[in-house]
Amino acid sequence: MSDHYERVKIELQQMKEVENEAAADEEQLSPASVSPVPADLSFTARRDPSKSSINGRSRSKSRSKADAHERQVNGKQPTDPAPQGQRRVSNEPNLHVKGTARLLKVKTAANGHVESGKRQTDGKCEHHGKEDESKAAKKRKAVTVDTSKAKTSLEALKMSIRQLKWKEFPMGRRTACDIYWHGVSFHDNENINSGQVNKFPGMIEMLRKINLSRAVRTMQELFPEEYNFYPRSWILPEEFQLFSTQIRLLKDNDSTLKPTFIVKPDSGSQGDGIYLIRDPADLRVISGSQIKQAVVQEYIQKPLLIDKLKFDIRLYVLVRSLEPLEIYIAKEGLSRFCTEPYQEPSQKNLSHVFMHLTNYSLNVHSGNFVHSDSCSTGSKRTFSSVLYRLASKGVDIKKVWSDIIALVIKTVIALVPELKVYYQADIPPGKPGPTCFQILGFDILLMKNLKPVLLEVNANPSMRIEHEQEVSPGVFEYVPSPVDEEVKVGVIRDTLRLMDPAQRKQHVTSSTGGGSPEEAIVVETGSDEKEGLADSLPSLCLKQVFPKYTKQFNYLRVVERIAGIFLRFLGVKGTMRLGPTSFRTFIRNCKLSNSSFSMASADILYIDITRRWAGMLPDSREAGMCLQAFIEAFFYLAARRFKALPLREQVLLLLEICEGALEGQSHSEKPRPHRTHANPASSQSSAPTTFSSPAMTRRRHRPLQLSAKANTEN
């Protein structure tokens, strides 16, 4: 600890000074310099044991980015770093930078002293040490997470933050945090002007049963084959008469058909209020006559069974951003089993919820529910254990995964147009605000023929990693659930890793040529993982599926193009409705008026459609034309102009007219700034879109007989 220690300390400080000077010249940070590891870096000298040892060690705070420069100033050409997990074999000692997996080359003098091999600097040594340490600490500050609104996901979130060695603020923080974790909605905390929030504005509203059905229905009208994974649905009470008429006609045409329907309350969750019916007269009412807002769907009568039990799949999907659209799917999910052996629905067993409904919150109250510490047994298992069992019976698991991935991507594409309208209303262009991401819970049922069917999408999937257990009569306590912890902690942790502000980059690249959804079952190490993430963490459990498979699915993004036109003509910042003047401006700027369709006709169209949608959206406080109403008007205009063509072609041609007219205007005048342009790749390669008019609504329900018949044959 004498002169030798001081000389080593000076040499290390000289190394830091040269490193900082080089960094100032280059003004560039390497990925490792912003890795989410602690700022303290300990340097230890390692030498060949045959040479004299160095007693003691020096600790300091420094930047960890000068590997290449160190070699250069030593008069050596940069060489490739040693493979991770392997030690370099050399006769010279190395300085190991903890947390970066880097080895800095040094020389050993004959007397055993460590020489840096750097050029000496004149009079600059110790007095720069504290300044360098302060800069390094700022560069390496821990990612901060506000968990004050996390609610039920709190335990899994805390565990994930500890694994990442980030900093949690459970009571909030006066200064801004990097990430805000909300338990319910974007508006859990109204005073966020920066950072990232784990909820999108409007996601709760969009994933209510009615709005989800409307969004998917629009896509079914445009792409019926691509969106046949969603059961036929009717919206109550507005379509009660249509539902009743179609069921009566169906039974009149074939008296042997006995379809079953499932009724889901619009804002229900955890199985609350769900019931089965076989006739419209069985619909439950409230207040004596008023039918509750709900969705009634065809019931899938032939599901895939395991151990004679019906089950569904909960998959976790991360929407990392809307613009550009990024979607990740967790490679592991949950399989939730009913607790009563399945029988096809009959009048006698319609009320057997433990037989027909897979909701965990319902079945957990069954006396047959089995809590298991194993991931492959019990009433809640991992999805991979189910896949393994199916594979043992010869099932093509890659095909199953391929179909599920396609279902997820198509569903998110159906949601994006309206989400962009919500986003711009809450965070208008030019207003400071956070960026958003969100974990969604997809509930999927596998039919007997292994076709996946979308049951619903949850904006706030449960992230609890414990369950209630009765330890004595009437006394309950929470005990850990190994299956939930196995799946949910990884999803939250890796979501945080992907949203790490130090790692988050606009890395969206063009779609990989020739890729197919089957490849998504292979979970590879992504670029986010390689950019300085801690070596101790496992590989990402989230797999990017979009934009990776852009070429396969981008043609479906036609409704986004209509939403882009809608957003262009919204008059007031923060609004979600188009006023009559803005609608007239749309007609005029897109050159859609002519001798057969005057501006007066446009006014009448606006009034009729807006009034009808106001009746269907009684809770809306804002006047004007919503996006779905604008879509209907757009479909009407397309059908009027191109009468002899199929609907999809009609809408495509009208989109080309509108986009061409608006593009011509943008050359002559400065375009109005807005956040939600369609993806450039989408505007060039995606197919046109269409929405539904009243006539199209009737046409949408026409094939009921074929659908019900097919359902009984599967």
Image (cartoon, rainbow, N blue to C red):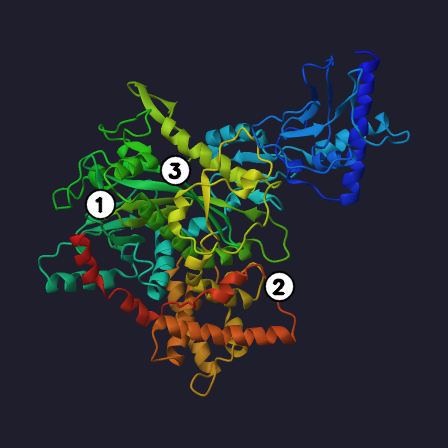
As shown in the figure, which amino acid type bears the numbered disc 2?
A: Pro
Q: Secondary structure at mark 3?
A: loop
Query: Which of the two discs, 3 and 1, sits closer to the camera?
Result: 3
- Judged left or right of residue 334, residue 35 is right
Instruction: Give the numbered dot on residue 332.
Output: 3
Q: CA distance from mark 3 to mark 1?
A: 21 Å
Q: Give the left or right position of residue 634, taking residue 189 as reference.
A: left
Q: Amino acid at mark 1?
A: Pro
Q: Amino acid at mark 3?
A: Glu
603 lies left or right of 569: left
Q: Report the side of 101 relative to 281 (left or right).
A: right
What residue occupies the far left of the structure in this picture?
A: 255
| Residue neighbourhood size for the residue with mark 2, other residues' Cα within 10 Å, grouped as few (<14), some (14–19), many (≥20) | few
Looking at the rendered structure, the number of numbered marks drawn on it comes to: 3
- In the rendered image, which residue does mark 1 sit on? 303
Q: Position of residue 300 (x, y in %)?
A: 22, 49
Give the label on residue 673, or none. 2
Q: Nearer the viewer, mark 2 or mark 3?
A: 3
Alpha-carbon span between mark 2 and mark 3: 41 Å
- Marks 1 and 2: which is nearer the front? 1
Image coords of residue 643 (percent x, y): 35, 80
Question: Is tag 3's residue or tag 1's residue first in the polypeptide sequence?
Answer: 1
Q: Quadrant of residue 255?
A: bottom left
Report crowding for label 1: few under 14, some 14 to 19, many 20 or more residues within 10 A (C-alpha): many
**Which is nearer the eye, 114 or 285?**
114
